[in-house]
Amino acid sequence: MIQITTAQWYAWINAFAFPFLRILGLIVAEPILGNRAVPISAKVGLAIFVTMLLTPTLPAMPGVQPASAVGVVIAVQQLLIGLAMGFAIRIVLTAAEMAGHLSGLQMGLGFAVFFDPQTSAQTAVVGQFFGLFAILVFLSLNGHFLVLSALAESFRALPVAQELVRSLGWRNLVAFAGVIFSVGLLIALPIVATLLIANIAVGIMSRAAPQLNIFAVGFPITLAAGLLALYLAAPSTGAALTRLFEQGLIAIPRLLESFAGR
């Protein structure tokens, strides 16, 4: 008669549960798979499927009782690591939306907002356009496959262990979040500069012809100039987003190294 010890049960549970939590955290935080339009059951099912594929290739898991205090700490830590990896990619998408917000304000479309179910908040139309554009660039780079590949490598760079991750990793993640403002401004800079020139021209027109209704003429001019700038800046914007996504994918192994204290 085959007998299974308690230690064997714990080993089997840990071999699946701990990787599952890290994978689920990444899927929930990642901008494509973590979209609210994707059902929760699909996210959990995908996490289970990926875990089943990766489990035979992963290093041995800690032999602790899953329901113990140590087991709970390891489980929470794995979930946070997955969330941090997904957040590193989501920062890039947020930077693109930031550029859209800045461009929309300069175009005079700051009032053109709608309810975004992804963020449960009012979102500017131009910002949503930049966000969708960034998602298309991400998919064209096979970013979703690269993220899953980085996830598989994360278990070798930062194995599941009882030791707590280093706080340096969280500081590096916060520092990387500063990219939202700097890169968002750089992406929107050509459009903002174009609209600044258009506004200066409108101001000169209003001074030269005071009888001109500046509100009736200025808004169509800035809107047309903004749309033209969006069209002309699309190739350079795509190239900038490509480099930004590459930086985001590079940031994941660096983040794991800082978590491991290397």
Image (spheres, rainbow, N blue to C red):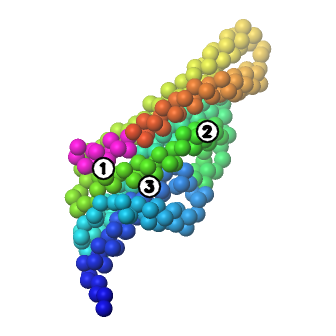
Q: Amino acid at mark 3?
A: Leu
Question: In the rendered image, which residue does mark 2 sit on?
Answer: 133
Task: Estimate the x, y position of residue 206 in percent, counting from the top left.
Answer: 71, 14
Residue under the image location 28 percent in, 64 percent down: 60
Which of the marked residues, 3 or 2, is nearer the chain's N terminus? 3
Residue in the picture at 30% in, 49% down: 157
The label nearer to you, 1 versus 2, is 1
Residue count near mark 3 (Cα–Cα under 10 Å), binned few <14, some 14–19, many ≥20: many
Q: Is residue 40 visible?
A: no
For this rendering, which residue is in front, 20 or 134?
A: 20
Q: Does dot 3 land on a helix, a strand or a loop? A: helix
Label 3 or label 1, whichever comes before in sequence order: 3
Q: Nearer the viewer, mark 3 or mark 1?
A: 1
Work out whether 222 lies above or below 35. above
Report the magenta residues as a range: 251-262
- Residue type indicated by callout 2: Phe
Question: What amino acid is at disc 1?
Answer: Ala
Query: Of label 1 and label 2, which has the lower sequence position?
Result: 2
Q: Which residue sits at x=54%, y=54%?
A: 33
Q: Are marks 3 and 1 in contact (CB under 8 Å)?
A: no
Query: Total label count?
Result: 3
Can you say which quadrant of the picture contains the C terminus? top left
Q: Tell me residue 154's x, y (percent).
A: 35, 51
Which label belongs to residue 157? 1
As drawn, which residue projects farthest toward the front? 1
**Helix, strand or loop status at disc 1:** helix
From the image, tell me which residue sits under label 3.
Answer: 26
